[in-house]
Amino acid sequence: MDTRKSLWLSTLLIALSGASLPRGAAQSSSTPFGYTSFSQQASIEEKFLAVPSAKRAGEELKTLTAEPHLAATPEDRRTTDYVAEQFRAAGLQTQIVPYRVLLNWPKVVRVQAYDSAGKLLMTGPTREHVEGDPFQDNPRVVMPFNGSSGSGDVVGDVVYANYGRPEDFKELEEHHIDVHRKIVIVRYGMNFRGVKVYLAELHGASGVLIYSDPHDDGYYKGDAYPQGPWRPETGVQRGSVQYLFKYPGDPETPGVASTPDLPDSSRISPDGNQPHILSIPISYHDAAPILKAMKGPGVPEGWQGALPFRYHLGPGGVRAHLVSQQDYQRRTIWDVIGTIPGTDLANEQVIVGNHRDAWVYGAVDPSSGTAAMLEAIHGIGALLKEGWHPRRTLVFCSWDAEEEGLIGSTEWVEQHAQEMSNAVAYFNTDVGVAGPNFTAAAVPSLKDFVRQVTQSVPSPVIGTVYQQWRQKQTGGDEHRASNAPPEEGVEVQVADLGSGSDFTPFLQHAGVPSTDVGSGGDYGVYHSAFDDYAWFVMNADPHFLYLQEMARVLGLEAIRMADADVLPYDYPAYARSVLSYLNAAEQKAAQIDGDSLDFRAVRSAADRFAAAAAKARSLQLAPPHNPEALDLSLRAVETDLLSPAGLPNRPWYKHLIYAPGEFTGYSAVVIPGINEALDAHIRSLAQQQITALTEALDRATQTLDSIH
């Protein structure tokens, strides 16, 4: 047996048995930033890393995915109680926190399509089914529907709009195709589904069909489930079409927590982030007869999917009848919050979170993340039993109703808005494990922190997570995409934070430094009935070794941040990122509008921020006797980067460096106020946003300069 196989087998046996790691196996080769001496902490971390068990993680995943558990259902409540029980068993002070929020459940969802002669082409949505899946026939599998969809009954000619991006609707206009009162059919990918509906609504469409093309996550990519991991013919991606890029959370209470006792007078109309038109998700089994019968011009280059016929734009050839009857009610959801009080720095909070609700079973999204978080908590519970306590307070959170619009996390952040200045970090995982490829996103001040943590966690293959990450780093995930230039001088790129998961309210509304970690792979059953335990064991992580890996990474993030001598924010890296964003924006502005925009003030502010960051780092390397005062100033810098007025046209989003794009929804737009004003060719707004960013950078500089 060669050395590589021997090491891999040893890791596998350790993981399955839950036994201890070899001494020193997980220690970093150097003292991590934030620590003056690391020997005692290394011993604590080694004890922690030995506890998370692959076998137990698999058992937890099986329990969490035993039944569909849509937010606010009795099944969701059972997962609430299970997670709370696990929190308490590990020694966490645990509470279940309810919120009363507006959610829709489907009563009737139907699509019928007819050809030009009036012949019925299809009726759907077709029930999801493949040969042999043991979970697909559960009667509690919710029919395919979209959260936040409008209700109604509409008929119209069908127009194909590719991915439903701004450039796609512009292309239709150039072909003199008007989508007014039409049914638009678009494929998943490239932007958030809510943006597709938003743009269709802006262009006057009556309804939207969103389907999964096999080119994007089906047989074109590889074998479809159950032969492989990709989306089968009847698989449907459910999802929310809430206008998340305007504000997330309960649509009736932006900026206010929707607690059970909130009076009706404090609620507003949900129109601000809800579509007014119908949207229905369908499979490519149901989309195929529609697309095949459509007439009109052939599609432009790049619009052809993988179905075995030529696509056409329409209108003509197909008329569709959409019925969507949605039951909108205020329903109760439940967050689970577990706390471990800190010792000498107890006012500072390190928050860790993952959502628990799922469209159906949610084996990958989000239950793999929940199982990983529970295993991390088991490891921390073992340390507590040995007498260890974190210096900073640890808070573990199991969020509800994330799928409908990041609701559980947003309501909690809004409820605790005044306390968020004490939250020194938020560590998120969502799609914990879809395969073997580690990925991460973070604010620039925490990117190297994530790299250092992964250098201390063993890989299930060989070496460390960092080494495997460096070797197999992949891109292309729209949830981690960004318009930013790549970071220079690093071995591994850490992505920027856009939206699509529960870090959004922490970072982009409250200014809490955040990270998001996961492990990706060939994942073609996203938000379908087939994201179940059977698919997971067959395709994602047969021996649950990557669940164990994610538990170790997530838990080590929490422990290392909680115990650090001084908060390990890397502000020189932040300053370099801001300068690179400004360079790119200035180049864009020159191409769009010549040299009419004045970047001199904001460039000078960024230079001052960089100089102050360098001085602060020298103090972090030799911290004073009062680390709490230093931490307070360091933490305030991220809050300084918020705009009290918020971003133009969407004031809930306050961060001036990172936001989800208004027309992307998931992927990050850096310095969004400036870049989106440039994209809209509104020079005065771009200059105004340059001024806002200048003021924010000066606030951050003053905060760093106040450190002595």
Image (spheres, helix red, strand yellow):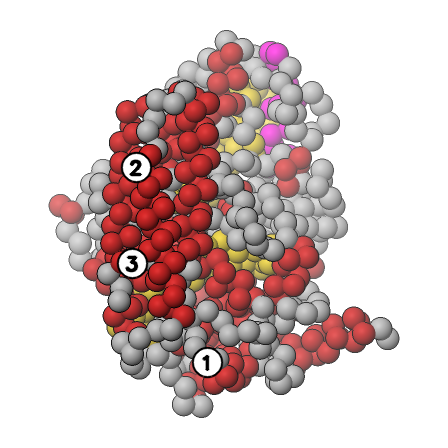
Q: Is residue 483 rendered to the left or right of residue 255?
A: right
User: What type is the residue that disc 3 sits on?
Assistant: Leu
- The residue beneath circle 2 is 601
Q: Whole-Å distance between the Cαs marked 3 and 1?
A: 24 Å
Magenta segment: 283-297
Which residue is found at the position 65% from the left and 63% from the top?
467
Q: Are marks 3 and 2 in contact (CB under 8 Å)?
A: no
Mark carried by residue 704: 3
Q: Whole-Å distance between the Cαs marked 3 and 2?
A: 19 Å
Q: Is residue 69 rendered to the left or right of residue 544?
A: left
Near-viewer residue (575 or 102): 575
Of badges 1 and 2, the one in the foreground is: 2
Q: Quadrant of the C terminus?
A: bottom left
Secondary structure predominantly adopted by residues drawn in magenta:
helix
Near-viewer residue (325 or 82): 82
Q: Is residue 681 magenta?
A: no
Near-viewer residue (12 or 285): 12
Image coordinates of residue 165 in percent, x first then y, are 49, 28
User: What type is the residue that disc 2 sits on?
Assistant: Ala
Which residue is found at the position 29% from the left and 58% from the top?
704
Q: Earlier in the sequence, mark 3 or mark 1?
A: 1
Image coordinates of residue 126 in percent, x first then y, are 59, 38
